Amino acid sequence: MFSLESVCEPLKTSITLKAARAEGMAVVEKLNEREEAYEALLEAERPGPANKMLKRRLDGLGMDTRGKAFVVELAQGTTRRKMLLDYIIGLSSRIPTEKMQPEVRIIIRMAVYQMRYMDKVPDRAAVDEAVKLAKKKGFGHVSGFVNGVLRNVGRQGPLPLPGDLAQRLSLEHSYPSWIVEYLIKNFGPQRAELVCKAGSERPMITLCPNMLKTTAEDLALRLSGEGMEAHLEEGSVTVAKAGEIAASKAYAEGLFHVMDRSSAACAWALDPQKGETIADVCAAPGGKSFLCAMLMGNEGRIMSMDKDKRRVDEMGRQAKRLGIRIIEAGVRNALEPLEEIYDRVLVDAPCSGFGVASRKPDVKYGKSMKDVKSLAELQKGILGASCQGLKAGGRLVYSVCTYTVEECEEVSRWAVENLPLSLEEEKRIWPGDGWDGFYIARFAKR
């Protein structure tokens, strides 16, 4: 997933948007934003997570926070609504989207997303900039086609949707049909609709207050004082615009880190105590470790591990920004048995990620039930290795940001049957209303 800091890096030039417009630069600036989104989406057509592609495009851009926010919204939104956008385009094009050149298809998708979902972008501007982008990228010979399709889209009335529930949810919320059918079969039609709807919406931006330095109430007041739209939400703070966060003085002072409430619930379930030793075996980007350190009053020891050295280094930097002294960030494969004995172990395992589809829209595409089952085996392996480092009577929390039975209840059942663990509590958090989808289970070692 792209880092918030990369999205929020301040502009390194003194030219403001207002001044740029006065100098006749508005078209170039907006075209650059759309071009960056286009390049990110084009890269995402190749194998690999789309959010990481987007991060690579954003890192080092000489663009202000508003410009980066535009790029993120356009690239992520186009991915989030991809299947519906193709359906809309198909109603206005004589050529099916699957037969279009990838570059042309992306340009048209982006324009339709702006027309349908970005209220501040006039339809005319979306169409004109799409035509210009097509010409700039060497597709001037089809610029008339691009223009015609988009103008037809602009004249469309209400969308005709299938009567069959599974087909409608798949199309309306851009979910592969197998996921929709799985949800309906396992959780019923009402839950399936709620989950699909949540996954197709823009996510809330949630901040976890640094309890070593402030409270949620004081943080909300502080951010409001800096001109942000901040709201209290059950012990956390939500803000309206990501672009404002990393540039704030409160961020520089380490008063918060970005973390969804569902992720925070994992740390609360672990219930770490002052003076204890904690292992967070799949820790990056570090939010749960940071909250554990706060709950421990910065007293004790937390080993925050991940196999990606770059992410481990970033965890260390963020811990320092927050004033956390008890975290030791290290590179480690979670399938290797823990060498020390810990009071508590947190296993936030790699998973299908369907519960965070609104934040990482690419997770919906390109997976199958075979992948889910393979991930479940990986999760079992990590649990087995982690259990070896847990003291008798210690607590282990297993969490995944998904809702498949195979990765949730079935893994917990396997753990009870094959490891010296007793299940104390398990719960699902469904995506929606500002929460990511999560499964959390707490075990005690026998």
Image (spheres, helix red, strand yellow):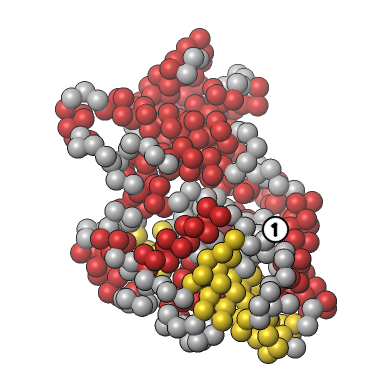
Give the side of residue 407 with respect to residue 193, left or right. right
Give the side of residue 70 with respect to residue 384, left or right. left
The residue depicted at 22 percent of the width and 60 percent of the height is: 226
Tell me, yes or no, if residue 236 can be seen here: no
- Residue lying farthest right? 418
Q: Which SS class for mark 1?
A: helix
Q: Please determine whether, in this image, residue 296 is positioned above or below residue 34.
A: below
In this view of the protein, which residue sits in the foreground, 386 or 95? 386
Q: Amino acid at mark 1?
A: Leu
Residue 34 picture quarter:
top left
Give the side of residue 252 with respect to residue 308, left or right. left
Expressed as whole percent of the image width and height from the top left, the position of residue 418 reads 83, 76
The quarter of the picture where the C terminus appears is bottom right
Expressed as whole percent of the image width and height from the top left, the position of residue 399 reads 63, 69
Judging by the rendered image, the residue that carries numbered circle 1 is 183
Expressed as whole percent of the image width and height from the top left, the position of residue 309 reads 56, 55
Q: Please determine whether, in this image, residue 349 is positioned above or below residue 39.
A: below
Circle 1 Cα neighbour tier, 10 Å, few/some/many (<14 / 14–19 / ≥20)? many
Give the side of residue 144 with respect to residue 385, left or right. left
The residue depicted at 32 percent of the width and 76 percent of the height is: 213
The residue depicted at 72 percent of the width and 85 percent of the height is: 445
- Residue lying farthest front? 339
Tell me, yes or no, if residue 53 can be seen here: yes
Q: Please determine whether, in this image, residue 425 is positioned above or below residue 198.
A: below
